[in-house]
Image: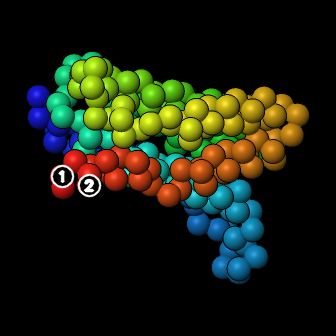
């Protein structure tokens, strides 16, 4: 199966997710700079979620470059990832409306955690389709960032009920961990083409 259709579909879903998120940002009531202050929590939650979608988009591109073929399991694993990412506009808006409330913060973290787990499932399905000597498996190596991220999300979800600000800091730290695109696959692809 041609992976270009999967890439195009995923790009479209991610573009729609960003569009929905930005439409949640409303103009201020007044015309003074001070009128922007009430919008700050919504804007910051948007920025963090935009960064997350950008990270997934960039790494998804690299991941599919490493895929030699796409099968039905990969399609369903990709849909699973798109599902969890599609919840980001809802959770982003909720956190933006209630920035230091426990449940919005925890649900936001749960959406991030489930997207991270869906990412692992997608990676594993691609590796499985490539066979025992998987190019992607070699490129990923120990995948330290992939192992740390769910732990940080779980810590964020737990801390949402005690220190919601810490939860937001953990979600932001996890995004910073991934802000630089995953170079492992890119380096492996460059080595493979030489």
The spot of residue 13 in percent (x, y) is: 33, 42
Residue extending farthest to the right is 162
Query: Can the viewer see residue 16 in this picture?
Result: no
Above or below, 175 relative to 150:
below
**Mark 1 element type:** helix
Residue at the farthest bottom position:
32
Q: CA distance from mark 1 to mark 2?
A: 5 Å
The residue that appears at 63% across and 36% down in the rendered structure is 148
Name the foreground residue: 187 vs 37. 187
Question: Relative to the observer, which residue lies in front, 70 or 147?
Answer: 147
| Label 2 neighbour load within 10 Å: few <14, some 14-19, many 20+ | few
- 160 with respect to 146 (left or right): right
The residue located at (31%, 48%) in the rendering is 188
Q: How far across and how far down the image is residue 45, in percent? A: 64, 52
Q: Decide if residue 138 is in sight here.
A: yes
Which quadrant, please, contains the C terminus? bottom left
Mark 1 residue crowding within 10 angstroms, few (<14) / some (14–19) / many (20+)? few
> Residue under circle 1?
193
Residue 190's spot in the image, x, y percent?
Answer: 26, 54
Q: How is the image coloured?
A: rainbow
Q: Are marks 1 and 2 in contact (CB under 8 Å)?
A: yes
Pointer 2 residue: 190
Image position of 152 with respect to 55: above or below: above
């Amino acid at each position: 199966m041609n992976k270009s259709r999967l890439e195009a579909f995923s790009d479209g879903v991610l573009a729609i997710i960003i569009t929905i998120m930005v439409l949640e940002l409303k103009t201020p009531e007044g015309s003074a700079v001070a009128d922007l202050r009430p919008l700050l929590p919504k804007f910051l939650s948007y920025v963090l979620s935009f960064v997350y979608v950008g990270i997934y988009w960039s790494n998804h591109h690299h991941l599919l470059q490493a895929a030699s073929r796409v099968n039905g399991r990969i399609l369903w694993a990709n849909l699973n990832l798109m599902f969890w990412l599609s919840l980001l506009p809802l959770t982003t808006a909720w956190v933006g409306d209630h920035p230091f409330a426990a449940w919005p913060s925890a649900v936001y973290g749960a959406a991030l955690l489930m997207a991270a787990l869906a990412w692992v499932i997608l990676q594993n399905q691609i590796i499985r389709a490539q066979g025992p000597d998987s190019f992607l498996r070699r490129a990923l190596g120990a995948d330290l960032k992939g192992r740390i991220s769910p732990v940080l999300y779980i810590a964020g979800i737990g801390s949402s009920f005690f220190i919601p600000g810490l939860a937001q800091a953990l979600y932001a730290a996890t995004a910073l961990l991934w802000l630089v695109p995953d170079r492992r696959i890119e380096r492996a692809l460059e080595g493979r083409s030489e």
